[in-house]
Image (cartoon, rainbow, N blue to C red):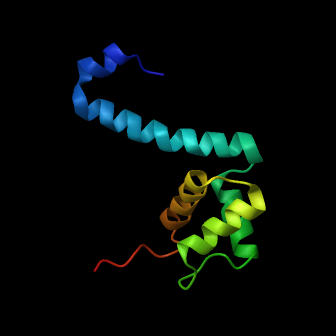
Amino acid sequence: MASTSLLRSQGKAAASWYNDHMSFQAYIDNIYAKTGKKPEDFLKDAKANGMVGPDIKVMEIVKWLKSEYGLGHGHAMAIVLTFRNAGAIPSPKKK
């Protein structure tokens, strides 16, 4: 992990990128430690259980991840983001 002094020397932009990047990766790492599953494993399971597609609501997926795998809300949302990034669920519509 990068030291605070290194982050300070690189400026706020570098620190912000590092914190954002590592925070998401930390979620994924913690999920793997808890479940032994990677995001692609969750996606495979979601497809097998009909939990992806254009008509599935995010909160349906979150509820399924919580009940099926014991994930907390934040960890479930991290997995939802990986589904969205893989194109398995649509991005929210802009109003």
Q: State which quarter of the image contains the C terminus.
A: bottom left
* 63 sits to left or right of 19: right
Q: Residue drawn 60% across and 57% down?
A: 76
- Residue at 70% over, 74% down: 47
Q: Tell me which corner region of the image, top left, top right, bottom left or bottom right, holds residue 14.
A: top left
Image check: 51 left or right of 17? right
Residue 80: horizontal and vertical position, in percent? 56, 63
Q: Residue at x 40, y 35 (%)?
A: 19
Q: State the image quarter where residue 79 is shown.
A: bottom right
Image coordinates for residue 78, horizontal then vertical, percent: 54, 54
Q: Is residue 88 above or below residue 13?
A: below
Q: How many marks overall?
A: 0
Q: Please provide percent x and percent y for residue 38.
A: 68, 51
Relative placement, left or right, of 21 versus 86 is left
Above or below 28: residue 73:
below
User: What residue lies at 69% left-to-right and 70% top-to-bottom?
Assistant: 46
The image shows residue 76, relative to residue 30, as above or below, that is below
* Placement of 50 over or under 21, stated as above or below: below
Give x and y (percent) for residue 67: 74, 63
